[in-house]
Amino acid sequence: MRHVIVTGGSRGLGLGLVEGLLAEGYWVSTCSRRPSDELQHLHGPRLFWQAADMTDGDSVIRFVEAAATWGVEGGATLWGLVNNAGIAREGILATFPDAETAAVIQTNLVGAIQTARTVLRHLLRQGGAGRIVNISSIIGLRGYTGLAAYSASKAGLDGLTRALAREVGRRGITVNSVAPGYLDTEMSGTLSAEQRRQIVRRTPLGRLGTAADVEPVVRFLLSDAAAFITGQTLVVDGGITG
């Protein structure tokens, strides 16, 4: 009866995380700006969805509070958070619009901080113990031309992971990041066919990743088996950054 909150669970990696956690027996709350058909097909007594905009702090807080109440009413204990919601906007920084920069940083980093803060307040009121997993990216570790704002936001998530792990470790709460490589999801749809071929050629395992490659790693970090792992960034990229 453990309850995990997953942001951005309507499609792509987030949807895969929601599916995997439900299959594992977790109660799952998720949010997105609007529901997808795929998410609606997963409806059931252990799934809660509410619209939320990660660029709107009040919207984020309302979602977490509603999710927490739903879990308590169902008898599930709030256990973890997966900060997955994110957007990518491509463009050379010298000509990149301020509005686009703000949207990326607010969604990927500030929204994650606000969500973590609200969830942590609930975990601490419960007496501690729990898990936070931030979905960062190898782009935050290595960079990529045309993705400076995105790279900065994901590097910021890894910094958040390390600092927060020190803050809450003594309360039995672990904080880790998972840094996926290039995934065959909607977010990689802006890659040209040649870019995809280049990435596949540079990847030792010879393919793009999938949500199914990342979900078990997140699930492991949420589990009791990962109780002594905190402040770490686990890379899941088919070897491309090796």
Image: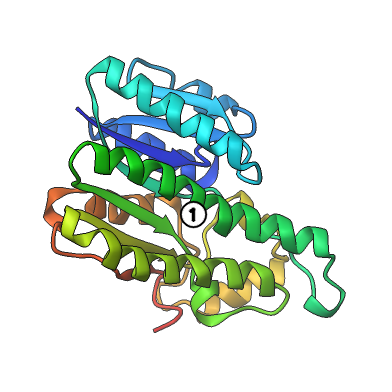
Q: Is residue 219 above or below residue 182?
A: above
Front in this rendered view, residue 110 or 26: 110
Q: Quadrant of the C terminus?
A: bottom left
Q: Residue at x 55, y 39 (%)?
A: 11
Front in this rendered view, residue 229 or 194: 229
In this image, 20 relative to 224: left or right?
right
In this image, 149 relative to 203: left or right?
right
Front in this rendered view, residue 236 or 97: 97
Local secondary structure at mark 1: helix
Indicate the position of residue 123 as horizontal and vertical percent values: 27, 41
Residue 7 visible in this rendered orientation of the protein? yes
Q: Is residue 220 above or below residue 152?
A: above
Q: Quadrant of residue 160?
A: bottom left
Indicate the position of residue 175 as horizontal and vertical percent values: 30, 59
Which residue position is annotated with label 1?
113
Q: Is residue 156 above or below residue 100?
A: below
Q: Residue at x 48, y 50 (%)?
A: 84
In this image, 1 relative to 162: left or right?
left
In this image, 146 relative to 52: left or right?
right
Q: Residue at x 34, y 63 (%)?
A: 164
